[in-house]
Amino acid sequence: MLAAGTGRVDITPPIGIAHAGWGAQSHEGAEGIDMPLTITALVIEADGNTEPAARIAILDIDTCMLIEAYDVRIRDAVTEKTGISAANQRVSYTHTHSGPIEGLSWIVKGAEMVEPWFHSMAPASAKAVEEAIRNIVPVRADSGTGHCEININRRPVSHDGNVFTGRNPGGFVDHEVLVTAIDDLDGNPVATLVNYACHPTIMGPENKLITPDYPGPVRETVESIVGGTCLFLQGAAGNQGPVDGFSGDTAVYRKLGKQLGIEAARVRLSIDPVPREEKLEEILPSGADLGMYTFNQAGESDDTLGVVESASSLPIKEMPPESDVQANFDRISANLETVRKGGGSVEEVKQAAFPAKRETLLLRHTQTFGRGGEKRDIPIQVIRIGNTALVAIPVEPFAEIGTAVKERSPADWTLFSGYSNGYYGYLPMAYAYPEGGYEVGPTAPFEAGAAEQMIEDCLDAIRKLWD
């Protein structure tokens, strides 16, 4: 028998914190809060085994990304407070661009608040997991699928042949909504997992408010219709954007989030984790003869619980020596500081900051992968909850990766996610490299062919739990 509980902690940052989601924005600090940012936790255990080492914790965090240092800090805090091992934790982030952003920016105002906010996530995560443990009850689980078209391929080609970030109706898109239902033994909802692939970039440069973007209204809608607690697990969104993006109108993200939430709730209400068989009890005369049926339990739901850690050995691009990148970064940063101190305009500061931000990405890659030119192991985590596989990798994967894994998986249902357990950059399909564009530039440390290898290695990891 499975058992599960949920918890949630508010991590909304203070007004005035550096709000650096967009290079094209003109404001600096966040000027208000439209919806709170939260950490939501789900803790699961099996067969009455309440030992901390046997529990699995899943965290849904409203932030753009969590680099390895913050990911490790969260795991350590959860382990210290609850005993749940780091290997049994999934640390997922929604990828909202409407909150604080880690890393160098042209923004100075409110920047001193950013690092303390990221540090606060570790104790907040532990608190959410502790609450989830207190709420654990026996449960059953099953999954289902739906369809929602608030996303679109985001790699169109301009009239001069350049790929930009926008709307590409002819590009590959994954409209699938995957939903996992976790109910107590009386059929009451405990948790709902919603898995969907779309960049939370509905709110754009004009937005001056803290928001979770569309995942916030998704959770709110599912919880209001279904009950229980909803967790949002971002999908393979590397080349998936919203149909209406880069807006300054908060009504837009609320509308699209509600649209996805309604579809997720519809699917959730159709899922019954209890296997049942139909029986005609009698035909009741009543003008028309009425068939009176019962739907009795016919066996037990799958209560298998497990987790496997694996890795994909992926080819890394050749990169300059870290010392050269560091020297260039220092030069660009010094120029940015000179422009700031010299009273440069906002536009002049931005122009000095753009190359600094790009060089930050390259510096981070060289610090992680060195000179490149060889293969490195990228983590894969698979959690099994009954008949459902939850696959998580620490990159921004193209949607084709998630779709291929879902279609070929041995599990009845497979929820595929990037944006989990750290961050290593974009993972594009091989065809995208000659096309160019943001996702294959300095944001992607991998050689062409890495995505195709990741697909096979994710499938091997799932088979380990299903075999």
Image: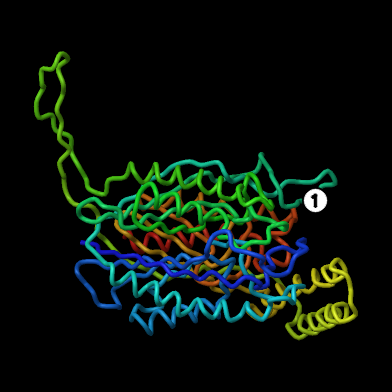
Q: Position of residue 407 (x, y in %)?
A: 45, 47
Q: Which corner quadrant holds the N terminus?
A: bottom left
Foreground of the two, 319 or 305: 305
Q: Amino acid at mark 1?
A: Asn
Which colouring convention does the figure follow?
A: rainbow
Q: Is residue 372 left or right of residue 288?
A: right
Q: Position of residue 231 (x, y in %)?
A: 43, 59
Residue 429 visible in this rendered orientation of the protein: no
- Against 28, residue 415 (above or below) is above
Q: Residue at x 44, y 70 (%)?
A: 9
Q: Position of residue 149 (x, y in %)?
A: 55, 41
The image quadrant of residue 310 is bottom left
Give the secondary structure at mark 1.
loop
Q: Which residue is mark 1?
A: 162
The image quadrant of residue 276 is top left
- Against 95, residue 362 (above or below) is below
Q: Position of residue 99 (x, y in %)?
A: 61, 66
- Against 62, residue 164 (above or below) is above
Q: Which corner quadrant holds the C terminus?
A: bottom left
Q: Residue at x 43, y 61 (%)?
A: 460
- Against 455, residue 319 (above or below) is below
